[in-house]
Amino acid sequence: MKTKFITSILTLGIVFLFLCGSVSAESISLGDIKISTAGQKAELPVLLDNAPSGISGYKFTTSFSSAGVARISSVKMPEWASIKVVEGTPGEYVLVSAVDLEMKVEAGSEPVEICNLTIEGLSEGTTSLNLEISEMTDDNGNSLSVAVTPAEVSVGSFVSAPVPVQTPQPASTPQVTPILTPALPPEQSPDNQVPSQEIIPITTPTPVPTVVADFNAQVRDGPAPMTVFFTDTSSGYPSRFLWDFGDGSSDNTSPLQNPQHIYRIPGVYTVSLNVSNSVYSNSTSKAGFITVRPMDLPIRGAKNNVTIFSVPDGAEVYLNNAYQGITPVLLTNLTTRNYQLRLHKDGYYDVVSPITILDDVLPTFISGFEMMPHLAEIGEVSANPPQTGAAYIVSYPELVEVTINNTTVGKTDIMVMNLAVGTHNLTLKKEGYEPWNDTLEVKNGLAVIQTYHYEEPYFPLNRTVEYVQYP
């Protein structure tokens, strides 16, 4: 009986050890960093202890427990990463993302280089650096549970100076000189010497510099839509930033140190920047800093292609009274200029509308010309004029295929004019990305600007919607 009891206990222990060993998580242990003075830098490798099923990609952000002590000045990405994304350097909050498209990180690799962080000291103190991992998957598409050990970052003189040791010097000459050795008190006998005192250096705190906000821009004047790259030139090692680009758009502000912004509406804009470190803050505002002019028209003489649709189709198309064909019709080799378009179909009123053909500005696709039935045939006293609007589809990255109501209209960035008022189905497709299914809400006399942001490598992130006067 006793033997069976002992055997049962051993069996349960072995099963428990097996289960404990089978549930394991990968880990990243960040080593502690010591930086002697503000302005100096140190390297911090980020290593994953093992990858049993390889790594397909990851995304994480950095954070410090105490602001203004240190920041990430740069990030060196691993050689295995096919797609590399680093945003926010130099700064305390940095986004780092990588994707292994060629499966260079094989199953069972250990350790795996994630990246190499360069830490820069800002002011004397101690802070903890942590990695907040929002996504890390293996080659099978499974999420990895990674335990991260933060790094303690110390800036300043934190190590005590060594205690000086006196070394007796040998006699320099053979001359014998009598030495009188006084008798030592009992408490100072050779066997009972007073221990030397430890010398502790006095550390003077490094003063935190006063910040002064300033900035410049790569481009300050140009046609809409205009992309502007801003550069922070503030002094005093600021660690927090807040930009206001002044155009009132949905992405009107940014916390990045060196952001970029797209101005889509012509105008003159004031740009403001607020910066701060652990002690001080400062703001600056530059009135009329950005000038956005109306969209440039191309040089006359360029050739373009335009597609004309009508509702219903089968209408005769005339451009400046010259017959072009039956809708839907593709018009080619058109010179950049304004034209008069006329659509004619028996039993319907003619549609007469001016159109503008543009070159190297926006791919132009003209659709949705609604034709009103003739009153003599339908017996109505009056007819309501058709209501139309326009849509401007923008994407990051660009060259995304755009389909409206199951009709492919081109690739972003693209302007679609004369769309019927109401809701239209919109589909965006690009190789390597998930399809994005959405809707267009077209309003009479307005152009809806819908901007789509894809997060690399493969899925939609967010979108913005704005309305402007049209035409």
Image: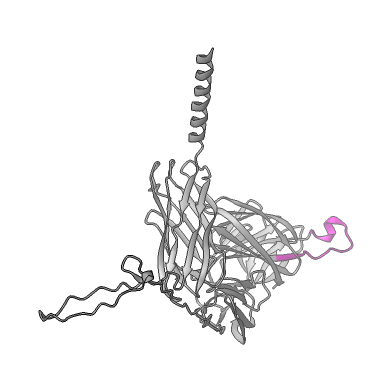
Percent across and percent down for residue 118 are: 43, 66
Going by the image, does 386 lie left or right of 471? right
Note whether residue 170 is visible: yes
310 inside magenta stretch: no
Which residue is rendered at x = 51% and y = 27% of the image? 13
Using the image as rendered, state which of residue 113 and residue 413 is in the foreground.
Answer: 113
Q: How is the image coloured?
A: one colour
Percent across and percent down for residue 319 are: 62, 69
User: Which residue, as the protein is rendered here, is positioned at the far top?
Assistant: 1
Image quadrant occupied by the N terminus: top right
Percent across and percent down for residue 150 are: 51, 57
Note whether residue 456 is visible: no
The magenta segment is: 373-389
Is 193 above or below relative to 285? above
Q: How many marks?
A: 0
Q: Which secondary structure dominates the residues rendered in magenta?
A: loop
User: Which residue, as the protein is rendered here, is positioned at the far bottom?
Assistant: 287
Is 425 above or below relative to 17? below
Percent across and percent down for residue 423 are: 73, 56
Going by the image, does 370 lie left or right of 123? right
Using the image as rendered, state which of residue 14 and residue 272 is in the foreground.
Answer: 14
Image quadrant occupied by the C terminus: bottom right
Using the image as rendered, state which of residue 447 and residue 76 is in the foreground.
Answer: 76
Which residue is rendered at x = 53% and y = 68% of the image? 92
386 inside magenta stretch: yes
Q: Quadrant of residue 262?
A: bottom right
Using the image as rendered, state which of residue 84 and residue 293 is in the foreground.
Answer: 84
Is 139 above or below relative to 393? above
User: Which residue, as the protein is rendered here, is positioned at the far right?
Assistant: 381
Which residue is rendered at x = 49% and y = 52% of the image? 58
